[in-house]
Amino acid sequence: MRPTSIYHKAGQTIKSHPAITLSLLALLSLLGGYGALQSTVDNSLPVWQSTNDPHWKRYQEFIHEHNIQDPLLIYLQEATTQSIEPLTESLEQITQVDHIYSLNVRTKSGGTSVLLSLFPDPGLVQHELSLLLNEVSTIIARADVHKVHLGGVWFLTDRLDSLSARSTQTMFPLVIGLLAGTLLLLLRQMKNFILIMACGLLPGLQLTGFIALSGNRMNMILLALPPLTMILGISHAIHLLTKTGGGTEDSLDVFARVAPPCLLSGVTTALGFLSLTLSQYPPVKQLGLWGAVGTGLSLLTSFLLLPLFFTPATQPYKYRFLEPLLTKIARRKKIILFGFALALLFSFIGGQQLQRGSFILDFFKQNSVVRLGYETIEKDGIGLTPLEIDLGSTGFSNREIEKKFQTLAEQHPEITHILFSFSSGMTVPATTRNGAEFITLTDLDFMLEDVSRLTLLTQTSASEKTLALVEQIEQFCQQQLGRRPIPYVTGSIPLYTMGQKKLFSTLILSFSAAFLSISLIMGLVLRSVRLGALAILPNILPVVFILGIMGWAGLPLSVATVTVASIVFGIVVDDTIHFLHSWQNASRQGGDQKQRLRKVFSYAGPAMITTTLVSGCGFLGFAASPFLPLRNFGLLISLAMGFALVCDIVLLPALLLLEKPNTTDISRSQP
């Protein structure tokens, strides 16, 4: 019995029970829709931390021990504490404000400004902090103040949450519109158009809801999954709906013939996602898990819905350039291989320039309020990136500690201020030679108690540079304050940067796992070592190409882009699978390489081109996202898919044409 009979029987079972099939799809979609209505966004610090991370545990102990919360920084240019007294009093009336610390600032340009540090009640979660920020913003808008800029850790988190939420409002509609428009333009068949769109929209909705129902919230990484799932579902449907029945096959025969490569492509895409679960970075691990779930939902929806309604195309959908393209490939195959070798070299050189880490302000547009505010404050000489130093009992006097850290600041010009905090709640600021002058009447000499912790205010920089500074400060503290197993340096910023450091290891580990698992699966299913090896090269090149483009364009491995390699490899292998599956079928029918390729181009080529054009246009919809890393993610995958198509319809045929006519291994692969 041929293996395809399994798919034929499955299709027959589905077609024989339409009520059960549609009820199952309706149930999944209703659950997904219900959950999607409850979906929220959270980019706060706990989202990015592993519960068993010792640094995270230590930070939680630290904030509990000192009963603190990161402050909201309110910077008022050309103001004094007296002139903004009504504003300060109004802010102090807010229920969830613990206290406000006010400082007059003499900026580097000689002007006078005010820095308010608003400390919320300890223990507030990000949702409560966002509500507090809204209340603060309302009071500031009503006050008679001008040139106000905000900063701080949870202020940035709130802005990132806002960008993420806006992405769902701007990006999703554009992605759907581009997918629909491209499909209508290429297919021009309303029935098939509706079926294909349903195969994309339903799993996208289901995945969004299931993520919410599982108790997880969307973050800047997971936001890419719903549109990605839609695109995967549409791709499966296109392959099923654009293959002809040859005039003799009914819909179930076509389904049974096309379903196996679709299933294999779904498995390889899921493996690409599952490779991300090896990451130590929780958001990337979540992306891998839910990406695999989304892949399964997209495949399930196509396999349940299409046998019920689709009819085989009576005429093959044609792209007229394929036949002359094949002729040119046959004549110039060595030139083509040389051209791809040059592209590989170009990409490799670009990859050598690939940067690690990310600059958080690059997540915002150049003219955004957040970015302009940060640049204004830091230009005036106030660092907005806090690093906490948990002193404990050092045995040194307050002045000795100040002298040590002033010496440290001389070595690191990015340190602008040192804040000395005491268990009584008092804070004494000290300005380094690099920062604006804080005008204050308090002095360390008047403090009878020992300082319990320090806060170093530093200029905002890329994560790699910040992490290097953290490591240098930790080494300094261990040498100058005494060796101890518990780290001195802690805080939300060091935790973020440590997470960023894990991104590079994520790329290497996840891509290696994806490469090995997908290569093994393809070799086993195709039952040919030669075809398995040939399948890898056209799919490795797009990954190398994209990493090279990132290097040449100066795009670093950030929170969003670090996953591109594994996802690209898992997605672009789909067309290669359909190509080689058709090649095997053509080989069984006999003929030389060119005759087989002509059959492959006629049968699988149109679907491959259509899926790439539709999917690529869908990913271009990510350009509407106000969140720049997500925008880059979509554009990079769109580029990769285009390059992968070129590899599949140009490079792969050239490689096959280089071989001597031999069908022995193909005949052995027959089931």
Image (spheres, rainbow, N blue to C red):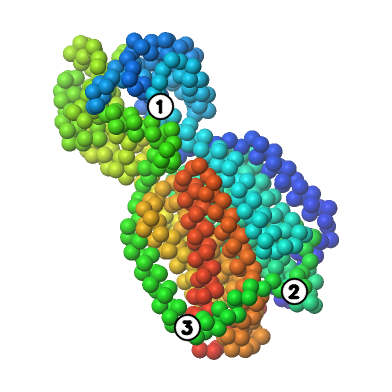
- For residue 332, the mark is 3
Q: Residue at x 44, y 29 (%)?
A: 155
The location of residue 619, given as percent across then percent down, is: 56, 54
In space, the residues marked 1 and 2 are separated at their CA atoms by 62 Å
Image height check: is 588 above or below 640?
below
Q: Give the mark, 2 or 3, whose residue is nearer the N terminus.
A: 2
Image quarter of residue 339: bottom left
Figure quadrant of the C terminus: bottom right
Q: Type of residue at label 1?
A: Leu
Q: Give the mark, 1 or 2, whose residue is nearer the N terminus.
A: 1
Q: Type of residue at label 3?
A: Arg
Query: Which residue is identified by label 1?
Result: 150
Q: Give the mark, 3 or 1, whose residue is nearer the N terminus.
A: 1
Residue 222 visible in rendering: no
Query: Which residue is identified by label 2?
Result: 315
Q: Residues within 10 Å of mark 3 (few under 14, many from 20)?
A: few
Residue 450 visible in rendering: yes
